[in-house]
Amino acid sequence: MKVLLVEDDQESAAYVARGLREQGHVVDVAATGRDGLFLATDGGHDVLIVDRMLPDLNGVGLVQALRASGVKTPVLFLTALAGVGDRVRGLDAGGDDYLVKPFAFAELLARLNALARRPPLSDVPTALRVGDLEMDLLKRSVTRGGRTVELQPREFQLLEYLMRHADRVVTRTMLLEAVWDFHFDPRTNIVETHMSRLRAKLAQSGGGELIHTVRGAGYSLRTPGTSAA
């Protein structure tokens, strides 16, 4: 699933984002309420994790603004404000669940999965398609030309990122941050190795090359005969 985490504490945000990415999810992070509001209205996220105390716009105001504009994405408040009144205000503002810090990551994950299993309230896509390549985000499965492509969790996460950015160039740095949560260059060929394996598995199902190397820039997933933006 695609998650938006709105959290101004860098250490807490890094911990949650890393844990979710290790589970194979795509995570966007915003450090202020206004940045979170912008991303939440434009990012096609499946679930939002929102802190109550945020710069610029607090969490309650953020969720109220989203609901007023018709955004129905499920919201989990993740906050240190533990009072009954705090919980009531968060839920009355449009939140779907409320988890108090400190928390167990397993419980956070279970609550997110429960929110994601609810019947969709909007037309958020549950599948990605590029040419004859299809990815089911709920079943965590991939097919190409109707044939199943067996992927390891990290390969699935890598392909999901490429498909979400289809026809655009993604850099090695972007992949390291989004897929491996590396905010530095580890000076290894980890991206190249996984990309090679992914290409080989996609090729086994036939069809033209989907993942293209853009010399000096990065990679682009696109159907044969098209060019990257």
Image: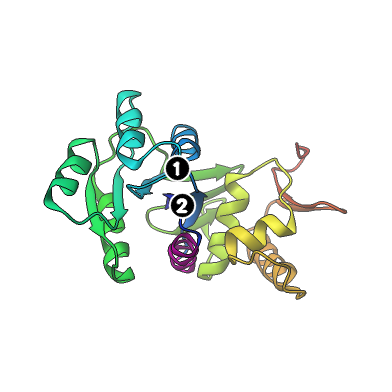
Is 40 left or right of 52, judged from the image as shown? right
**Residue topped by disc 1:** 55
Q: What segment carries the magenta color?
A: 11-23
Extreme residue in the right direction: 216
- The answer to whether residue 151 is visible is no
At a point 46% along the width and 40% down the height, the residue shown is 36
In the rendering, at what x and y percent does residue 37 appear?
44, 35
In the rendering, at what x and y percent does residue 99 appear?
24, 58
Of residue 33 and residue 202, the one placed in the foreground of this image is 33
Q: Is 163 included in the stretch rendered in magenta? A: no
In the rendering, at what x and y percent does residue 138 appear?
37, 53
Q: Is 18 included in the stretch rendered in magenta? A: yes
- Magenta part mainly helix, strand or loop? helix
Answer above or below: position of 97 versus 44.
below
- Cβ–Cβ below 8 Å for labels 2 and 1? yes
The local secondary structure at tag 2 comes to loop
Q: Amino acid at mark 1?
A: Pro
In which quadrant will I find the C terminus? top right
| Image disc number at residue 8 | 2
Is 12 left or right of 73, judged from the image as shown? right
| Image disc number at residue 222 | none
Label tally: 2
The local secondary structure at tag 1 comes to loop
